[in-house]
Amino acid sequence: MARSVLLAEDDEIVSLVVQDVLRREGFLVVPACSGEEALQFLHQLAGVDVLVTDIYMGKGMSGIELAERVLEIHPGTPVLVISAHLESTPIASGKPLPFLAKPFSADTLVRRVGEVLAPMAEAPLASAG
């Protein structure tokens, strides 16, 4: 079964490139152009395997605020923060978040998403019961 990625990115070009790269790797990508839209999708999906979010998305919720909300709703959801501008280590729910600086290569994106998902792959599966 394909791993799902909730992608919150307001730059249309970056969003399309990330979607293309991750879909070629077999991921199901749900794109959102704002934190608010990402939360709406999250409620419809009842969870995702990983959140990939830009830090700065114009007006409205930042990527860090989005990560906080996602982790409140679904604790333990892996988060990868992407940004061209980083002033300090991104933190959500009191923990530092993995970060990927823009611009990045397709290979680097795939590697970082895999690294963020790796602890989930090692965790025992919950019963469907």
Image (tube, rainbow, N blue to C red):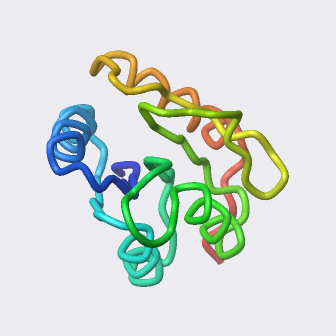
In the image, residue 92 sits, relative to residue 113, either above or below, namely: below
Residue at position x 63%, y 56% in the image: 77
Query: Which quadrant of the structure image shows residue 129?
Result: bottom right
User: What is the tally of numbered marks visible in this picture?
Assistant: 0
In the image, residue 115 sits, relative to residue 34, either above or below, namely: above
Residue at position x 46%, y 25% in the image: 101
In the image, residue 38 sits, relative to residue 76, either above or below, namely: below
Residue at position x 39%, y 68% in the image: 59
Is 52 or 60 nearer to us in this picture? 60
In the image, residue 129 sits, relative to residue 119, either above or below, namely: below
Q: On the picture, is 72 further left or further right than 34?
A: right
Query: Which quadrant of the structure image shows residue 115?
Result: top right
Measured from the top left, where is residue 58 in percent x and y? 37, 60
Is 34 or 105 nearer to us in this picture? 34
Residue at position x 46%, y 37% in the image: 82
Measured from the top left, where is residue 23 in percent x and y? 21, 41
Q: On the picture, is 23 further left or further right than 57?
A: left
Measured from the top left, where is residue 107 in percent x and y? 32, 16
Query: Which quadrant of the structure image shows residue 73?
Result: bottom right
Q: On the picture, is 67 further left or further right than 27?
A: right
In this view, the residue farthest toward the right is: 94
